Image (cartoon, rainbow, N blue to C red):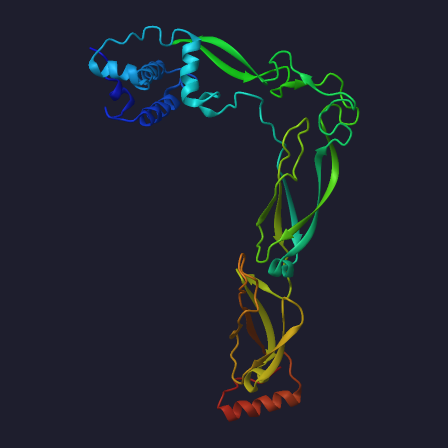
Amino acid sequence: MARDYYRVLGVDRNATAEEVKKAFRKIARQTHPDMNPDDPEAAARFREAAEAYEVLSDPETRRRYDRGDTINLEDLLGSFTGFDDLLRSVFGDGLFGSGSGGRRARRGRDILVRTEIPLELAAFGGPIDVEYTTRTRCPDCQGTGAEPGTSPVTCPDCGGSGQVRITRRSVFGTMMTATDCRRCGGEGTIVERFCPLCSGTGAVTEEVSVEVDVPAGVTTGSRLRLAGRGEAAGRGAQTGDLYVELVVADDPRFERHDNDLWHEVTVGFAEAALGTRVQVPLIEGGSTDLEIPAGTQPGEVFRLRGLGLTVLGRSSRGDLLVHVNVVVPKELSPDEEELLRQWALLRGERIDRART
C-alpha cells in the first residue's frame, strides 16, 4: 500500500505549499541523522519525510500522487546532488539555515566594564569617561594582517568562499555538507607576509578611553551598550560591542529606595515636643528648610514630593522622605535633671528611682 504522504508530514490534503514546507522543516530538525546518530528510527523518519516533501512540494508530482499514479522515488536520496538540492530548497545554503554558504562572518568579542558613579549622577545623568584595555584595529595594516604594501590573497583551497564541501555515506545515502576551510579559517583569504606590528592578527592591544552618556535614573546593574566599541578581531572582522555596567556608590546622606530618597534628621525630645526647623540636604546640592511641628513622634516621616531621583526614561522624580529620630540624652546635669523631674511631676509621670 502506498504511503500517505499527507499523514507523514501531518498536513491536510488541501495544505498550501508553504504549510507543506513548514511541516517538513519541523520534522527535519527533529529527525536529521546528524542530530540523532544512534537512532535508526529517526533516520528512517527523516527519509520518509524527505520523500513526502519531494512529492508534495512539486505541483505536478502532487497532482499525479493525488490521482493515484505511481511515483518512482527509488533514487530520491541516492546521490548527494539530489539530496543537497532538496535541503538547499528548504533551508538555504546552510544546513537548517545555520550557515551562510559563503565566508564565515567573524566578530570581535564583546567587552564588559564595570564602573562606579556617584548617586547624584545616577539621579540626573550625564557623561563619564570609561577607560579599558582592548584589541583595536592595527594602524599599520588597517586590520588586514598583511605587511604594509601587501594584501591578503584568495585562499587556493576554497577559492575565496571560506568553505569546503565534503561528502560522506550515511544510512540513507551519500550526504554533502559544508564546513569552514581549514587553511583560511573560513575567511576566504590568507596572508603570505605578516604585518610586523600585529604579527598578522590585524589587531593590537591598547588602552582606550570613551565618553559614555549615563541616562538619569539608572540603578546598580544597569548596562549601557556601545556598538562597535568592543574588541577588534582584525582582518576585516566586525568589531564587538562595549557594555558598561554601572555601580551606584553609596551616599552617606541618603538611602535609596527605587526612585525615592530617605534621609534621617535627629532632634532632641524638647524640639520634637515644642517644634523646630531643620536643614535637609538635597541630591542636586544645597538644602531646604523642613518644619518639625510640635508633638512630632520618634520615627515620624515627612515626604518632600519631587525631590528624589529622576525616574528612568521620564522627566518626573521620586520623593525625599525625611525620618525624624528623637534623641534621649544619656547624661544630665543636676539642673537638667531637676527640670525634668518637675516636668514629669506636672505630667503625672512616675519616676521610679533616682539617677546614679
Q: Reply above or below: 85 against 284.
A: above
Q: Is residue 179 left or right of residue 47?
A: right
* Any part of residue 234 in sight: yes
Q: Residue at x 71, y 18 (%)?
A: 191
Q: Quadrant of residue 90?
A: top left
Front in this rendered view, residue 107 or 263: 107
Quarter of the image for the C terminus: give it: bottom right
Q: Is residue 171 left or right of residue 149?
A: left
Q: Residue at x 59, y 58 (%)?
A: 216
Quarter of the image for the N terminus: give it: top left
Front in this rendered view, residue 179 or 160: 160
Front in this rendered view, residue 292 or 286: 286
Q: Residue at x 57, y 85 (%)?
A: 275
* Any part of residue 37 in sight: no
Q: Quadrant of residue 45?
A: top left
Q: Reply above or below: 66 against 248.
A: above
Give the number of callouts: 0
Q: Reply above or below: 123 against 85.
A: below
Q: Residue at x 24, y 14 (%)?
A: 65
Q: Is residue 164 left or right of residue 287?
A: left
Residue 213 percent coordinates (x, y): 64, 52
Residue 200 percent coordinates (x, y): 73, 23
Residue 174 percent coordinates (x, y): 43, 8
Residue 287 percent coordinates (x, y): 65, 73
